[in-house]
Image: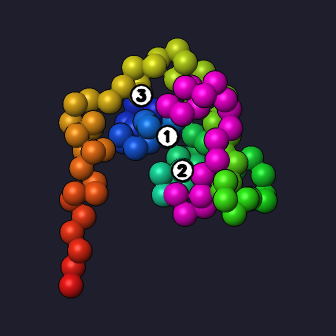
Amino acid sequence: MELHDLSATEKQLLNGYLEKHTKTQYFQLTDGVAGGLEARQIINRAAKMFDMIDGMAFNIQPWALRELKEHPELLKLTPEELQALKAPAQSRQRIG
């Protein structure tokens, strides 16, 4: 379980836990970023039921929260990552 190779979108998602001072955030089940972090055991589903509007509650693992609080630089975005986060809508082209 590693926090040193996070993508820009993973950093954004995890930063929400710190900014909101919470151990729980809500994401749609179709959220690939949350799904990837869940697969890597950085966050986990907090319940078996979900809300159609708010989505599923995901808790951050205690070890991950502790490490991110101790090393907030792990969530710092590089200039390239910031640019990439602004660009996705522009990079998707309609085909057809």
Tell me residue 64's x, y (percent): 58, 29
Taking the magenta stretch, the answer to whether it contains residue 86 is: no
Gap between marks 3 and 1 measured at Cα: 10 Å
The part of the chain drawn in magenta is: 15-31
Residue pictured at 74% horizontal, 59% vertical = 50
Residue 51 seen from this side: yes
Residue pictured at 57% horizontal, 40% vertical = 42
Taking the magenta stretch, the answer to whether it contains residue 24 is: yes
**Residue ranking furthest to the front:** 53
Query: Counting residues from the N terminus, which is met first, the one under dot 2 or under dot 3?
Result: 2
| Mark 3 lies on residue | 75
| Position of residue 47 in the picture relative to residue 15 (left or right) | right
Residue contact between numbered discs 1 and 2, judged by CB atoms under 8 Å: yes
Tell me residue 49's x, y (percent): 78, 59
| Mark 1 lies on residue | 13
SS at circle 2: helix
Tell me residue 12's x, y (percent): 44, 37
| Position of residue 11 in the picture relative to residue 29 (left or right) | left
Query: Counting residues from the N terminus, which is met first, the one under dot 1 or under dot 2?
Result: 1
| Mark 2 lies on residue | 34
- Tell me which amino acid carries mark 1: Leu
